[in-house]
Image (cartoon, grey):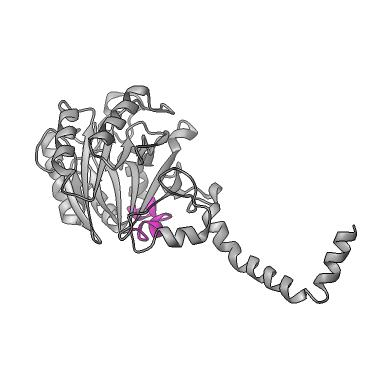
Amino acid sequence: MFKLKKLMKDFFTKKRTGWLLILVLILLTAPVIKKIFFGQSNVLFDLTGEKIASPEEVSDQVVAKVRILFGGDLMFDRHIRLAAQEKGYDFILADPKELFFSYDLVVANLEGPITDNPSVSLGTVPGTAKNFIFTFDPEAASVLSNNNIGLVCLGNNHILNFGQAGLESTKQSLSRAGVDFFGFTGEDENRTLVKKIGSLNFGFVNYNQFHEGGLLAAQEDIASLKEKVDWLILYAHWGYEYQPRAGTTIEKLARDFIDQGVDLIIGSHPHVVQQKEVYQNKIIYYSLGNFVFDQYFSPEVTKGLLVGVEINEQTGAIGIREWPIVMLSGGETILDQTNK
């Protein structure tokens, strides 16, 4: 009680100025501290997986940065197509759109072809054969470009749902919209992509578990590009659906890819967010879950993760930001407000 009385006396007498200055500093820095430590935009990691401890470290380590945002599976058929027909395609990604344009590039997995064919999955019963055959309206390509999704991976188990003609139609639609693409679909063409952002060259390769020869193709592409780029990024379509963790076989495969020269691995296909790992000072995200999808049968499949990578071009320092997202039953994807 004596200390409290003395503190009060000091505050209202000779030390008033000092205390007021401290109070002002706390008020001024509170938003910055909140931005670093709280909310979906705030989880800034270094490559040890530890949170950066102060605003000063953020500004010191990640300046003059190249910024790339990565997302999981995009699917614009079935309920998403129906919702877009009723409300327009713009509403699907309206909530995170501003975030997308704060990055130099947004990359995701395009889980199906873009064609002029009518949908065969729209209105089908979940679990039936036609329910898993996808085609996206050509307007989907504009949705990507309008949201700064400038690069998509095509190496997955649905891209050939409408055969080779569907794949070629997809490439044409993406090219017209100014969206780049890569991935192993059984062809040698467009398996990889090198993209320059700022002063850095990024190489993109794909491991498609669901196409014969996918592993050999990934290994060849890694060996071919690793000496030609500053960063080698592998999009992996792998694993088992709805499993909360990638198994030991996938973990070993991921680490093998890192040992072969990959700098960052982004996983897709399980439709749920799985674990991340730092191995040999490289980041592995085993699955980012869904990005745009119409699965609502459990909380896990309605949640996804966006991962922002920030690279200091001068020092090579790397920051990782995680942005949880939620897919609502109306068809739209929003930033997870519960993490603010």
Q: Is residue 108 above or below residue 3?
A: above
Is the residue 54 above or below the residue 78 in the image? below
In front: 295, or 233?
233
| Above or below: residue 205 compared with residue 308 | above
**Number of numbered discs:** 0
Q: Is residue 154 visible?
A: no
Residue 74 place in picture, x, y as percent: 31, 42
**Residue 319 shows in the view:** yes
Q: Position of residue 36 (x, y in %)?
A: 52, 56
Q: Quadrant of residue 61?
A: bottom left
Relative to 140, 225 lies left or right: left
Q: Which residue is rendered at x = 38% and y = 39% of the image? A: 288
Percent coordinates x, y for residue 42 in the rendering: 49, 53
- For residue 96: magenta? yes
Q: Quadrant of residue 148?
A: bottom left
The span picked out in magenta is 88-103
Task: Please say if 253 is above or below 79.
Answer: above
x 20%, y 53%: residue: 195
Q: Position of residue 78 (x, y in %)?
A: 32, 38
Residue shown at the point (88%, 64%) measured from the top left: 5
Please indicate whether residue 30 sits to the left or right of residue 73 in the image: right
Q: Which image quadrant: the N terminus?
A: bottom right
Residue 233 found in image quarter: top left
Determine the residue located farthest toward the right in the rendered image: 2
Residue 94 versus residue 83: which sits nearer the camera? 94
User: Per the image, is 317 magenta?
Assistant: no
